[in-house]
Image: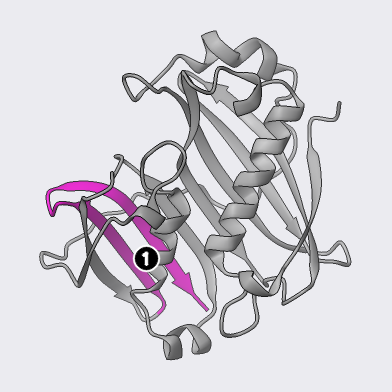
Amino acid sequence: MEKTGEYKRNCASYLVNSTGKLTYSALGNELLNCAGRHANERGFGRKTTNEETFAWVLSRLVMEMTDMPGEYEDFYLRTWVESIYHSFTNRNFEILNANGRNIGFARSVWAMIGMEKRQAVDLVAMQGESMAMYVEDKKECPIEKISRIRIRATEPMAQNAVRWSDIDINKHVNSMKYIEHIFDLFSLQWHEAHPTRRFEIAYMAETRYGDTLSYYMDKVNEKEYTIEIRKNDLIPVVHSRILFA
């Protein structure tokens, strides 16, 4: 089987925003779904491990786009494993429009955790042999890795309680829900005038049902913002950076 997987997707109407373009959270979901398919097809996915004992969790994600698919348009995702090290693996993506033209790239970092202790396991020992044959370290992903994000803000600009609709199969807040909440910090008018070109997110801790999320934001310049989400106003759980056009 090929090291790189390619998957055809469609930008359904419920995946677009007010400008008629695919949202970043919807794109993130599509990337995660294709990552799961790619891993399962090659023997190291959730369905091919003991899913009651172990789970793949997303640690870092960067998406950089020059354009987004529009409503009802087809698009293609290519994904490959760049490297495996200790408890983590790097997985990259290329996004193509319906005509096969590149419109973006994404980088991601994943860990496998034990469900009982909620701690990362030794990925090389567990999955290294089955994954090693699919490592594609010669294929280029030209976008930069995630930035080192620091937040100076001392007062939250928004808060919300974690609700049932935020929770995923691993019983914590779905990684894409954080992205939706972050984009909601900006107004409709702002988004329609300033398309997002790069979005970065780093996950540092789990958040569970009933926790309260607080959002701290710094304006670096007119087009760059950094955000920290804390649970119960104490523990940082997410760092994010957005670059607008």
Of residues 184 and 135, the one nearer the viewer is 184
The residue at the point 71 percent across, 52 percent down is 94
Tell me where residue 106 appears, x and y as whole percent: 61, 51
Instruction: Answer above or below: position of 5 versus 95.
Output: above
Tell me where residue 197 appears, x and y as whole percent: 55, 70
Give the prevailing secondary structure in the magenta stretch.
strand
Tell me where residue 233 appears, x and y as whole percent: 13, 54
Q: Is residue 27 magenta?
A: no
Q: Is residue 226 magenta?
A: yes
Q: Which quadrant: the N terminus?
A: top right
Q: Is 156 on the left-hand or right-hand side of 221?
A: left
Tell me where residue 205 appears, x and y as whole percent: 29, 39
View extreme (front): residue: 164
- Which of the 4 quarters of the picture holds residue 116? top left
Instruction: Answer above or below: position of 234 versus 193.
Output: above
Colouring convention used in this rendered image of the protein: one colour
Q: Secondary structure at mark 1?
A: helix
Disc 1 marks a residue whose amino acid type is His
Residue under label 1, please give it.
Answer: 181
Q: Is 159 on the left-hand or right-hand side of 167?
A: left
Instruction: Answer above or below: position of 42 versus 177.
Output: above
The residue at the point 32 percent across, 53 percent down is 239
- Which of the 4 quarters of the picture holds residue 121? top left
The residue at the point 35 percent across, 53 percent down is 164
Instruction: Answer above or below: position of 153 versus 19.
Output: above
Which residue range is magenta in the image? 223-245
Is there any visible trace of residue 82 in the rendered image? yes
Is there any visible trace of residue 45 in the rendered image? no
- Which of the 4 quarters of the picture holds residue 242? bottom left
